[in-house]
């Protein structure tokens, strides 16, 4: 069990560093969501199921969806801006 806990903590550190260093925004969102899932597992191991459920729902679920919607919105704005430039 100790090896599993150490693996989770190492994975969390790797996720935190890789979110900062990645170039693609979509990859950063997916890595952030995986960080949240691992954090919810850590909360379960610490015998706090209410925090684990909240972390999984908010951290990986709602926040991930909001990030993806924001990226889609930004991409739509970029496409509209490029179309206006072509018309000019």
Image (tube, rainbow, N blue to C red):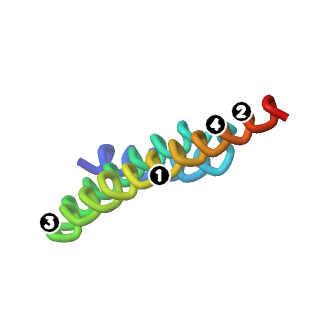
Rendered position, 83 above or below 57: above
Mark 4 to mark 1: distance in Å? Answer: 13 Å
Residue 83's mark? 2
Mark 3 to mark 2: distance in Å? Answer: 49 Å
Rendered position, 47 above or below 13: below
The residue beneath circle 4 is 24
> Is disc 2 placed on a helix, strand or loop?
helix
**Left or right: where does residue 36 sit relative to residue 73?**
left
Of the two numbered discs 2 and 1 on the same chain, state the one appearing first in sequence.
Answer: 1
* 54 or 1: nearer the viewer: 54
- Residue occupying image coordinates x 74% and y 35%: 82
The residue beneath circle 3 is 49
Mark 3 to mark 1: distance in Å? Answer: 25 Å
Q: Does any portion of residue 10 appear in the rendered image?
A: no
Of the two numbered discs 2 and 4 on the same chain, state the one appearing first in sequence.
Answer: 4
Q: Residue 63 in the image: x percent, y percent?
A: 39, 57
The local crowd at label 4, few if under 14, some if 14 to 19, many if 20 or more residues have their Cα within 10 Å, is: few
């Amino acid at each position: 069990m100790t090896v599993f806990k150490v693996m989770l903590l190492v994975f969390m550190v790797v996720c935190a560093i890789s979110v900062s260093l990645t170039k693609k925004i979509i990859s950063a969102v997916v890595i952030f969501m995986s960080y949240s899932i691992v954090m919810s597992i850590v909360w379960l191991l610490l015998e706090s199921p209410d925090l684990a459920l909240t972390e999984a729902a908010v951290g990986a679920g709602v926040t991930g969806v909001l990030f993806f919607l924001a990226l889609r919105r930004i991409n739509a704005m970029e496409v509209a801006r490029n179309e206006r430039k072509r018309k000019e």
